[in-house]
Amino acid sequence: MEDLAVELDSIKKTYRIAGTRKKKTAVADLSLSVPGGEIFGLLGPNGAGKTTTLKILLGLVYADSGSGTLLGRPLGDRSAHKSLGFLPEQPYFYTFLTAEKGLALYGKFFGMDKAELTKRSKYLLDLVGLAHDSHLTLDKFSKGMLQRFGIAQALLNDPDLVILDEPSSGLDPVGQKEVRDILLHVRDEGKTIFLSSHQLSEVENICNSVCIVSAGRSVTEGELADLLKVEGLTRIVLSGEVDTATGPLGFALNARAADGVTRFEVESGDTYRALEAARGMGLDLVSVEPYHRSLEDLFLETIKETAS
Amino acid sequence: MRNVLSIALNVVKDASRRKIFYVVFLFGLVVLAVSPLLPSFELGATAAFLKDISISLTSLFGVVLAVILAVTQIPGEIEKRTIYNILSKPVGRAQYLLGKYLGILVSLFGIMFVMSIEILILLGAKASMFSPVILQGVFAVFLEAAIISAFCLMLTTVTSIPVTAFAAILFYFLCHIKTGFLHQKLVTGTTGIVKVLAGGVYYAIPNLENFNISQQVAYGGGASATYMLRITGYAILFAAVFIVIGYAAFRRKDL
């Protein structure tokens, strides 16, 4: 059987709304599996239950029911946390400490000795581009620098599983690329990365598999390549914004007109028919290509279907 | 144990950068400022009065500092979410709570040690008197502050900073008047329910008057070693009870 880094089975969590007897469901019935050695993305709209799910994994919140494992140990078993790294959504650290002292504090919790800690801290601060700022207190750091520090502390114990909540938050495009490279490097070392992100392009670029959650339930889960693959469809882009609902292009699928172009998909067997129809309408062809959904398409379609 | 010590050390570092420590020096300055107003330092009675007022002021500052230090620890960390990055590591909630409490105790001890030195210098300068018995009085104040901080830490696991601070003030006064009002109700209560209620509260809360030895320190040779041992055990018992109750509430708390 495949080694799973994370497994959740029918997790439920409700919170009581302050000042009332009413309860709000944060996670309704969530099951997911994260294979070891992969980058796994947890996606979902705001309020879908992503943060609560991460907190349950980290032992910060307790599920009402359901079960799960973290690195093969039951949820709540603190020994699993020795091989766990975590980057919170916002950089929440003791800002009166310097980057070096901050890493020293966190390193002690993993039982690292001074020599090991010094060596590892130096390596990581260099890796995230903070080698020259290690003596500054964290309150002098910009948001991007704090995010880099957060990544360094998440990797401090050379973890087998790294849980990241919005890892590129606050970073400029160069910083985002650097973080992406670090994550791929960590994955190549055989570690598992579990990330929650709103940046779909980032997830699409680096994740092997994803789980889309909506209203506290897993609505789509699987390998990204399989989820994005669409057999037998062609995407056509035409110049000009036209209504395809009626007329010769009435058979077009998922048509949308914006930014001076009209995009739609057709069954591959209808490609020439569509091109003829477009020419008949006096529209110029911009592009025609086999259709592959973007993660954004998949995400929006999934959320739309769930809502309906 | 390493985790507890690391968290405790971090509390001390955090406390030392706060302005709380300046209060200590302010305390010294206030005492020094008012001492020339006293009539005569040649008289032993005045020196005793000086000792008495110093211990009383230390007690006041000690209680205030204990409340300030304790009420902000856990709610502050939850609000700033720094707690996430500690408890996601191999740190148990019991270790976290104990580390916080130990850090508060060390901070209070440090502050009160400085206060003791200030009092000793003041007595030496103004009354040409070296009076190490003052350390006994300050230690009793420290024990009182240890109970109050444990009480506050317990409450902050379930409620907010303002509520805890208010409750701490009530607790302080209740624990000081219990020997008077409550004991009187316990002994002379006319109805059974009054006696039961008074008795329940009387035995459930600590008697903070036990830690008020300013009279013995100021006007006598101090409290006996047996008494000091007894109140130390008393303080440890109540602090432990409060911390255990706090842990029971914090153990499964959603953060």
Image (tube, coloured by chain):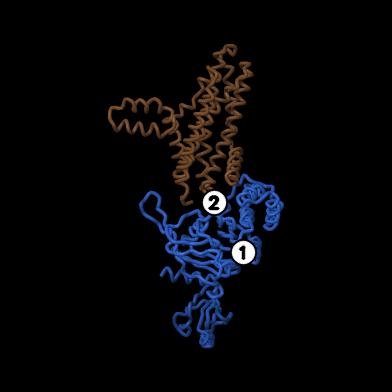
Chain colours: A blue, B brown
Write down the residue under mark 1.
A191
Where in the figure is residue B40, as x and y percent of width and height? Answer: 58, 12
Parent chain of label 2: B
Count the numbered circles shown: 2
Badge number at residue B137 = none
Write down the residue under mark 2.
B87
| Of residues A135 and A251, the one drawn nearer to the viewer in this rendering | A135
Q: Can you say whether A185 is above or below A269 in the image?
A: above
Q: Are marks 2 and 1 in contact (CB under 8 Å)?
A: no
Where in the figure is residue A84, as x and y percent of width and height? Answer: 58, 58
Where in the figure is residue B69, as x and y percent of width and height? Answer: 53, 38
Task: Report which quarter residue B126 is drawn in.
Answer: top right
Amino acid marked by disc 2: Leu
Is residue A16 something one can see in this rendering?
Answer: yes
Q: Residues within 10 Å of mark 1 (few under 14, many from 20)?
A: many
Q: Can you say whether A105 is above or below B105 in the image?
A: below
Parent chain of label 1: A
| Of residues B178 and B38, the one drawn nearer to the viewer in this rendering | B178
Residue at the image point whose x is 58% and y is 58% from the top:
A169
Amino acid marked by disc 1: Lys
- The quadrant of the image that shows the N terminus of chain B is top right
Co-location on one chain, circles 2 and 1? no
Where in the figure is residue A261, as x and y percent of width and height? Answer: 54, 76
Q: Can you say whether B120 is above or below A265 in the image?
A: above
How far separated are the C-alphas under marks 2 and 1?
Answer: 22 Å
Q: Residue furthest front?
A: B226
Secondary element under disc 1, as helix, strand or loop, is loop
Q: Residues within 10 Å of mark 2 (few under 14, many from 20)?
A: many
Secondary element under disc 2, as helix, strand or loop, is helix
Is residue B63 something one can see in this rendering?
Answer: no
